[in-house]
Amino acid sequence: MRAILAGVVTVAVAVAACAAPERQVEPHQVSAAAASRDRGPQSPGRYPVGPEVLAFQEYGRVIADRASRDQNFGGFMFKHEPEPHAIVMFTGDAQKRLRRYTRDPRFKAKRVAITLAELEAMKDQTTNQLNAIRLECWTSDADEEHNVVTVTTPEVEKVRQAIAGGR
């Protein structure tokens, strides 16, 4: 646990996850709150998405589906700034692996330290370890963009003690 928590997991203070019952938002309140929120003016050129962007996204989904079967696959993300593009992540020689699936310059290769499957396994292992130390309230997330597992909890001291104790 020490290696995973100390090396890969970020421990932070949770605000929304463990809010007092009177401050928690019910599902029916979310839609009402979202509907009443002033969204302000939309940036010109960003909305609505044109047919060329939709076609790129569809092509991207095909590439993501094919690349996700690669044993070195680390993740896939669409980005829209400065121009629509996709980041395809692999361990090892990411550029070489991406060329197996596409040579389209809108797809950018990014080398990551661990595969998406390893990241998800780390998240599951971290979840099991945190359950074992009986935290009252926490969340665990596999962040493929940054290639880390993130843990959020208001019980930071309890987690630090577990790490120090080798649990």
Image (spheres, rainbow, N blue to C red):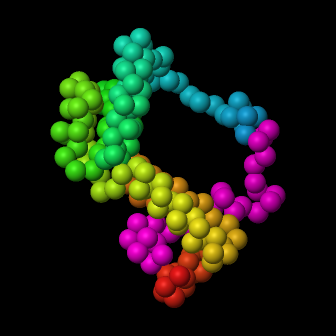
Horizontal and vertical percent for residue 19? Answer: 71, 61
Residue 44 figure quarter? top left
Q: What residue is rendered at 60% in x and 80% in y?
A: 158
Horizontal and vertical percent for residue 124? Answer: 54, 60
Horizontal and vertical percent for residue 138? Answer: 63, 64
Q: Which residue is nearer to you in this view: 14 or 59?
A: 59
Drawn side of residue 40 relative to residue 113, left or right: right
Q: What residue is rendered at 36% in x and 13% in y?
A: 52
- Please determine whether, in this image, residue 91 is positioned above or below residue 85: below
- Please determine whether, in this image, residue 101 is positioned above or below residue 136: above
Q: Is residue 17 magenta?
A: yes
- Please determine whether, in this image, residue 5 is positioned above or below residue 141: below
Q: Is residue 2 magenta?
A: yes
Q: What residue is rendered at 22% in x and 50% in y?
A: 92
Q: What residue is rendered at 65% in x and 57% in y?
A: 16
The stretch of residues the image draws in magenta is 1-29
Horizontal and vertical percent for residue 164? Answer: 48, 86
Residue 157 figure quarter? bottom right
